[in-house]
Image (cartoon, rainbow, N blue to C red):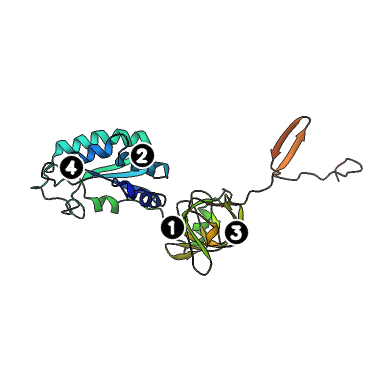
Amino acid sequence: MVEGGHKSYVPNMINGAAQADLGVLVISARKGEFETGYERGGQTREHGQLAQTLGVSTLFVVVNKMEDPIVKWSKERYDEIESKMIPFLRFLGYNVKKFLPISGLLGSNMKTRPDRSICPWWNGPCLFEVLDAVEISPRDQKDSDYFLSSYDFDSKHKMPIIDKFKDMGTVIMGKVESGTMREGDSLLVMPNKAQVKVLAIYCDEDKATCAGPGENLWVKLSGIEEEDILSGFVLCSVAGYKAVLHVHSVVEECKIVELLQQIDPKTKKPM
């Protein structure tokens, strides 16, 4: 969940957004508070920009504090905020799924829709209905054949490290951004170029045999100590060797796909 607020909360927001598939941007409807967050350098703008750069592309926006004595569930105030935020968020590249008014203090339009006497103009769903309707990609690893076939194991693995701790070995936390990982894989921790081996993978605290893009993981490693890892390091595939092809004055890296024939070094003819 992404929330515009005090700047001291930004580091916590970054950790959360780095693991999220979608976000909920909470905006204050109170006079002055929305304007402060929306103006250049404001927290609403900063949170929106940070979440987008961290990979959150789908966003729900809730306008909070609609119960404020000055706002009084005003449709004009809600429309004003929506008209300013939607162009800004779309400019950042978001797919804005839904805009809706709420009162976090009173719980209005969160679990249940508000009474018509409170907000007669709102005919949409409540926040929980919107979140419950979100389609989540199946990540059930019990069907191992389906699970393995859905991953591209040729893609290079990349997982930025969010945190680390010791638990009978070195354990790192992060979200897989690309490629896949399996138990027993030999990988690289960058930028210190430490070669490590994947001992165990945990997804939602359940042990897994492999993981792909979008998964938030705990990964137990060997070959590196916990104190040698910092947040922001990247667990990635070991760089493979590429042959160098020399043709006259041209020098190009190449990948050998197939060996067609073997040439006898003495006769220079196919063997």
Q: Earlier in the sequence, mark 1 or mark 3?
A: 1
Three-letter amino acid code at disc 2? Tyr
Pair 3/2: label in front: 3
User: Residue at horizontal 30%, vertical 33%?
Assistant: 87
Q: Residues within 10 Å of mark 1 (few under 14, many from 20)?
A: some
Which circle marks residue 30 in the picture? 4
Tag 1's secondary structure?
loop
Q: Mark 3 sits on what residue? A: 196
Q: Mark 2 sits on what residue? A: 94
Tag 2's secondary structure?
loop
**Which residue reaches farthest right?**
266
Position of residue 140 relative to residue 135, above or below, is below
User: Residue at horizontal 19%, vertical 36%?
Assistant: 79
Q: Mark 1 sits on what residue? A: 139
Q: Is residue 45 left or right of residue 207?
A: left
Tag 4's secondary structure?
loop
Three-letter amino acid code at disc 3? Val
Three-letter amino acid code at disc 4? Arg
Q: Position of residue 29 (x, y in %)?
A: 19, 42
For the residue pair 21 and 259, the one nearer the viewer reads as 21
**Which residue reaches farthest bottom?**
168
Q: Residues within 10 Å of mark 2 (few under 14, many from 20)?
A: many
Cα distance in 3D space between marks 1 and 3: 26 Å
Q: Is residue 153 left or right of residue 39?
A: right
Position of residue 218 relative to residue 51, above or below, is below
Tag 3's secondary structure?
strand
Pair 2/4: label in front: 4
Asked whether the residues under the numbered discs 1 and 3 touch, taking CB atoms below 8 Å apart as contact, a structural biologist would say no
Q: Residues within 10 Å of mark 4 (few under 14, many from 20)?
A: some
